[in-house]
Amino acid sequence: MTHPGAAFTMAITSLPITIDRVRKSFGTYVALNDVSLEIAAGEFLTLLGPSGSGKTTLLMALAGFVRPDSGSLVIGGRDVTRLSPDKRDIGIVFQNYALFPHMSVIANVEYPLILRKVPKAEARTRALAALARVKLEGYCDRNIAALSGGQRQRVALARAIVFEPRVMLMDEPLSALDKNLREHMQFEIRRLHDDLGITTIYVTHDQREALTMSDRIAVMDAGEIQQIATPSEIYHRPNTRFVAEFMGEANILPADLLRRDGGETILGMAMIRAESFHLDPAEIAGSKVAVTGTLTGKAFRGENWLLNLKTASGGDVMLSVPATRSAGCAEFQPGQELTAFAATAHVHSLPEGTAP
Ligand SMILES: Nc1ncnc2c1ncn2[C@@H]1O[C@H](COP(=O)(O)OP(=O)(O)OP(=O)(O)O)[C@@H](O)[C@H]1O
């Protein structure tokens, strides 16, 4: 059945965002320490960081619910720093949906349009179009209480896009969902973004979610952006130890611990991801490094084995061996000496001053 709403096309204009030296303190605590960030029109940017790093405060400043002490927020060339939230044309999706539980699905989605005094018939058509976008056309008359978590989150998305916002802000929208649904919704949100092209800022503390969804990731810690780059760059070429360790199993080793076999010289501290190690050097074409240690622990995790080595100088090395090439791992015994190899292309030098 073709729904009348499906014929309505959404007219969304993507806008760039400039965040310039935004500062926010709560008492003596500096939650945002002169944060600057440029977000391109139509980009999907994720703010990623541990609890308390300032992600939500930055998002709330953009939405207009937190007033910065100094600095400016510019959306599409318009300075919105002093504008009230309702004047900013921003769609917002929070973790707890904030839907009206006693109202039907369609009434929830129409609500932002009714607030903006859109005539009733047009509001209905546009709400149906937004529901079609999130594949909930058949649920118009259901009560929110009769929906699953994933369906509620879709209604929240439809409500956020229905007034054709120029910017979308999402704060941990999937954290209440179970793992499978969460992973499914990550793709759904990204698809919706790609269809509509709305400039989106997404907050999460989940590294994998950030890697899966984003054009770029801004890693935050203690009210500052530590690094902003593509997911691949952030993962493989972190610019600080904090980013390296926050983004996955990172081994930070003094470079002189690594035995070199041709290739460039590595100076200072080196980062090697756990999955970059191989037990069989023949698996690596080209120059490689090696590190030897005694096995202190091992764990089978389904898709891989995790092995812990202790080097002669007391350093810990973590290896992740895919189940598909893990022959022998089951028989390894604690105390056994093992040598792990990594391609020099997978050894990343961290800046000077990084402690072991
Ligand atoms: N209204 C407030 N009053 C006082 N302190 C606040 C207020 N809002 C935030 N903070 C503090 O500012 C810091 C940053 O908080 P924020 O909510 O931005 O962090 P976050 O990175 O989003 O963390 P989480 O992932 O836990 O939501 C925290 O230490 C928090 O306690």
Image (cartoon, rainbow, N blue to C red):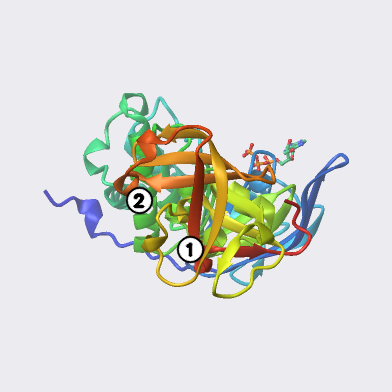
116 left or right of 105? right
The type of residue carrying mark 1 is: Asp
Residue 150 drawn at (x, y percent) = 35, 36
Tell me the SS state at disc 2: helix
Tell me the SS state at disc 1: loop
Residue 185 drawn at (x, y percent) = 36, 44
Residue 47 drawn at (x, y percent) = 59, 52
For disc 2, does the CB lie below 8 Å from ligand 1? no
Farthest right residue in view: 28
The image quarter in which residue 257 lies? bottom right
Q: Residue at x 54, y 48 (%)?
A: 248
Dot 2: within a 10 Å radius of its alpha carbon, few (fewer than 14), some, or many (20 or more) residues? some
Residue 215: assigned label: 1
Whether 161 is drawn above or below 71: the answer is above
Whether 198 is drawn above or below 242: the answer is below
Q: List the residue tagged with mark 2.
A: 187
- Number of labels in the image equals 2
The type of residue carrying mark 2 is: Phe
Residue 356: assigned label: none
The residue closer to the viewer here, 281 or 318, is: 281
Disc 2/disc 1 C-alpha distance (Å) = 13 Å
